Each structure stands twice: as structure tokens, then as C-alpha cells.
Image: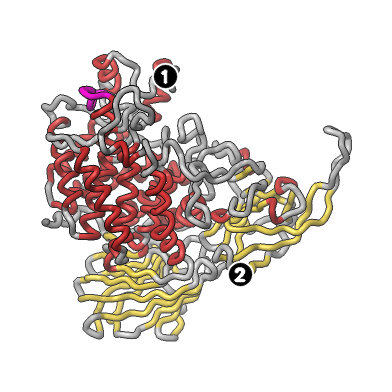
Amino acid sequence: MTIASAAAMRTREPLPLTAVTIDDRFWTPRRELIRTRTLRQQEGQMRRPGQQFDALTLTWRPGDPHEPHIFWESDVAKWIEAASHCLATTDDPELDQAVDEAIELLAGAQQDDGYLNVYFTVVKPGQRFTDLRDAHELYCAGHLIEAGVAHFEATGKTRLLDIVRRYADLIDTVFSPDGPCAGGYDGHQEIELALVKLYRVTGERRYLGLSRRLIEWRGQQPYYFELELQRRGTPGYFGTTLPRRPEQTRRFGEYNQSHQPVADQAEVVGHSVRAMYMYSAMTDLADEYGDDRLLQAVRRLWTNLTTKKLYITGGMGSDPSIEGFGPAYDLPDAHGYAETCASIGLVQWAQRMSNLTGHGHYIDTLERALYNGVLSGASADGTRYFYGNPLASGGTVARQEWFDCACCPPNLARLISELGRYVYAQGPNEAVVNLYVAGTGRFTLSGGEVTLRQDTSYPRDGRLTVTVAPADDEAEFTLAIRIPGWSRQPAVSVNGEPVHQPILRDGYLTLSRRWRAGDLVEIDLGMEVRRTWAHPAVASAAGKVALERGPVVFCLEGVDHDHAVHTLALARDVPIRAVPDERTGVVTLHADATADATAGDQLYGSHSPGQRSAALTAVPYFSWANRGLSDMTVWIRDGGGPSAAPAQTAPKPGENHSV
């Protein structure tokens, strides 16, 4: 295998998984849970009779129960990818064998010309690539490609990589400028970013060109999906599920982001997961081709998302009817969507944006999504899952063991098992710490090999030490450590000497010097509890406040209170105490509050119900719904009092300033 050429625009790139070790108090138990319980539980679900693994045997016949689903290859692929990430850093013969067995099932299901999709092999033979809008063929292909790349990088085995390359070669022919699907693209974006990964690991530029075509053709007129519908003559896989689609062409064009050319798009619309995967691919292609139009587009879209349509938890998608975005500031708490996969997609996109531009504020958003919108997607024991992640509940919401559309469980597993790829990044002579995770990162810089050792109890507290260990005892390079936007007065020292005016450049503390073995950087970010208010246009948060500490958003659960959580109010001048909590690995917040007094049995009355004293307990949002059914809310009634501190103007991207 050859490695693809250096990127055209990217300032940084992540370290490979094999260059990162994680021995972190918060993350190590969660990652081990993924390997030892979550992946086994998910494999068990997919091995049930008539499910994903059975379907790959191609024994289903019309009239049999358990018709293979159009999504199923993607579930298997994400599971393989997650397992491969585990195998990259852990010797697990049992898991390795299970992955090899799954790969052989995929090999057996592959057709002679490289095609690999059970639904169009046994359910709708002869109709491949005729329902790109609905049938998820290229989406499944994309996840298979990602799995092939991950498995090769983790194990060095080429079995799955060879399988997906044959499939990618077929797709490249079918979607060539003179192929039968010229001008076409997928209804659920995913393959575009996968093809970039395939190019980077093989060096085969055809895959990069195919990704670019699928992006550039999207939204061009005449719209491909309309032509496809005329040719097919049937309504498509979801035709009966979405009967009003022909009347709402604009809405459903936005649904899959095909309403206009992608480089012209400025507002995040439609299905949120599709959007995140597409924006990730656009960022990759802007990087590889030095395409400024794509770069400006993803910057516009990022700004629109983070200033108008992002939940405080890093969730997105407020409209359940399309699993996607509503209008600006439309962020209902109890009846929104905030799919786990969407937050995962945001993590992937944010990392690409940071590596491309060098700006740390993208990692701030990545961290928000990771510690809240992603982690909430699985139970504490790693075997039950949320598909959507509401910010309020009346006590009826619980995680499930599995779903008919099981995209979220293996997606969460593959992200957490791949955490090492998000912790660090490196430039030509720059070692970058993006996330605070105890362990080591091994860098290959122009100044030589360097290992960084992080020690921290984050996110329980904000203290961090970084020990430098150059391979040749000393090396000259830049060490860049992200300072989150919420950290207003971080204390920094090098070898015990305080840095009185540390310089923050693009969200990073940058220290350029000749480093010697044992040099030590110490940082205290501060970890005060923050009260956060939403924009007045966010109706569900009007008159309410949220609690944050470090990267963690907190919520109230009924199990901790004698009053319904929506009746509790927190005054602005009441002190909030943070108490270490072994159950969550972070802290629990405690404060004196008030609650509405019971007003008898009358539904309505002419007098205020009055207030009574109450104790308030807030727990990390990611930990909710692990202690039985109860009501929950992130947004707490603002009890008033002294005004909040004046808003501080955040530095503009690229602006340098002293901390």
C-alpha cells in the first residue's frame, strides 16, 4: 500500500491510533466497556435469526419473514469499524475472530462485478442504482469503505480493503461522466467522506475524483432525483412513507441537501446526519483540492449552525418529521430530535474544520458534542441506547436495547473506540493537544520524534500537566495546547515558572522553544460552574438558565427531587457547590432553590401558587436516565436576582490575544 500525497490546505492532521495510548480515569473505563460489552451486545443483536448477519448469507427468498433492510450493511460495517479501532491498540483474539467472520460473510455476499448490497441482490434484483434518493446504496457502501480502511489500518489485513476497493471501482465506473448514473449522487450522504479516506490510504486518485463528482453534481439542474423518478416510474422506497413529497419539492430537496449546489449553500437544512457527513466531505475536498469555494461554504454553514441551530448539548435536529433542522432558534427541548448520529457527525466535521484551519474554537464545539450529545446516547452499562436525545422529559423516555434502524448504537461505538484520533494533531513542526485525556501521544515532527504525556482528572477538574519527551533528549518545536473558550483566566507554568502573559493564538496556548526531556507544562483552566442563558428567540429556554462546568452540561432529574423538576427555580445569586461523584466520574452540583407550592386540586386559580424552599441537584446530562424513569430538564427556571455578568466578546477566528 502507498500513502496518499500531502494535503493541499490542511495545517494539521490527527495522530494514528497506534501512536496514542489512553489511560484516563474518565475515558478508559468507557472505552473498555465498548470493547468488552457494547460490541458483544451489538454483535448479538445482529446475529439474531433473520437479522443483519443472516441476511449476508443471501438465503432470503420472497415471502420469507425478515426481509433484509436497506440499512443493514451499514450496521455491520460500523460494528466492524468500531471493533477494528479496538484491535488497533488492544490484543483481543476473540474480537479479531468475530470481525474476520463478519468479513467473510461480506465476501460471500459480494457479486462477481464487485457489487455488495443484500437488498438489491435478493429483494430487488435488477434494480440496483435506480433509487439513489431513498434506498441508501451509496450510504451503505460508504460505511463499508470506512470499515475496510479502519480494518486495514488496525490489523494490516487487506481482506476487507480488497472487497471495498472492488465495490468502489464498480461505483466509479457507474458514476463516471459517461456512465449510466452520470450526474447522480446519493440520497443519504456518507460515501463522499469514505472515498477520501480510501484515497488517503491507497493513494488511488480515482477515489478522490469520484468523491468530488458526487459532491459537485449534487443540486445541479435538472435535479437528478426528479430524472431518476421519471425513469423508475415508481415512488421509491420511502414513497408511501412520505406521501406529500411531490407537493413539497423544496422541503424535500433541502431534506437531503440537494436543493442547490453545495458550494452555494449557506444555511444548514434538512436531515442533520446527512448534512454533517456531507459537510465533512466538503471540508476534506476543500483540503485536498485547495478549493476556496468549498472552504467558504463550510465556514458559512458552520457559522449558521453554531449561531442559530445548535442545542447547548451539541445536539442538532429539532424537527422529528425529517430528523433534521427547523428554522433558526427553533430548539424545542422535550419534542426535538438531537439524534446521537448527528452529534457524532458534528464531532467528525469539527475535527476536520480545526485541522484545516488551525482554529481551536472548532474543538470547543467538538468537545461540547462529545461530552454531552454523544455520551448521552448510551447507558452507563453500555448496552442500551438513545436514538434521539431530548433536553427535557416528563418521565417516559428510556434507552432501548436496539432499533429497527440501528444506526446510532454502532456509530457511538466506533466514535468512542476511535477517541485517540481526536486527542492530538500535528503540523510540520507542531505538536497539538486538542482534548485533555490522560495518556501519551507520539509525534513525528520535522524536529524529530517527540512523545507527550498528559496527566489530568478532566473533566472532574481543570488541571493538566504535559510532560515532554523528545526521542533525542531535546528538540525544537511548537507545543500548542487548546484553551477552551470558557476558560477565562488559565494559570500556566513551564518547569515550575509561571507564564505571566501566555499568548493565545487561534484558541491555543503556543509555546515554541527547544524542549528537553522531562520539561513540564502545567495548566489550570479553572472549573467554575457557569450559568448560561439562551438567545431570547429560543422559546423553550425563555426565562430559564442552564448549568455548565467545563465541557459538561448539567440537568435535573426527578429521582433527585421531591418536586417536579420543571417547577424548580434557581436564583442568580445563589452559590452552587460542586461535589465529586464516582457514579458519573465528574461532579454533582448542589444549590438552594425554590419550587412552586402545591395549589390544591383546582386546575386554574386566581392566585399564584407561591414558592417553597427546595434543594436542587444537577447531574451531567450524559448520565441521565440511568436510574429509572423520571422527569428531566436541562433548562431550569431562572429565579431572578442580580443581573448576569456582561457578555464578553469572543475573539474572532485568527485573532491573537493574551489570556
Residue where numbered disc 2 is placed: 580
Residue where numbered disc 1 is placed: 240
Query: Which numbered mark, 2 or 1, is in the foreground of this view?
Result: 1
Secondary structure at numbered mark 1 = loop
Locate the N terminus by quadrant.
bottom left
Horizontally, residue 395 falls left or right of residue 553, namely right
- Badge 2: few (under 14), some or many (20 or more) residues near its Cα, within 10 Å? few
653 part of magenta stretch: no
Magenta residues span 124-130
Amino acid carrying mark 2 in the image: Pro
Q: Residue at horizontal 60%, vertical 60%?
A: 530
- Badge 1: few (under 14), some or many (20 or more) residues near its Cα, within 10 Å? few
- In the image, residue 62 above or below residue 612: above
Q: Quadrant of residue 156?
A: bottom left
Is any atom of residue 17 visible in this view? no
Horizontally, residue 195 falls left or right of residue 626, namely left
Q: Residue at horizontal 75%, vertical 55%?
A: 641
Q: Nearer the viewer, residue 659 or 136?
A: 136
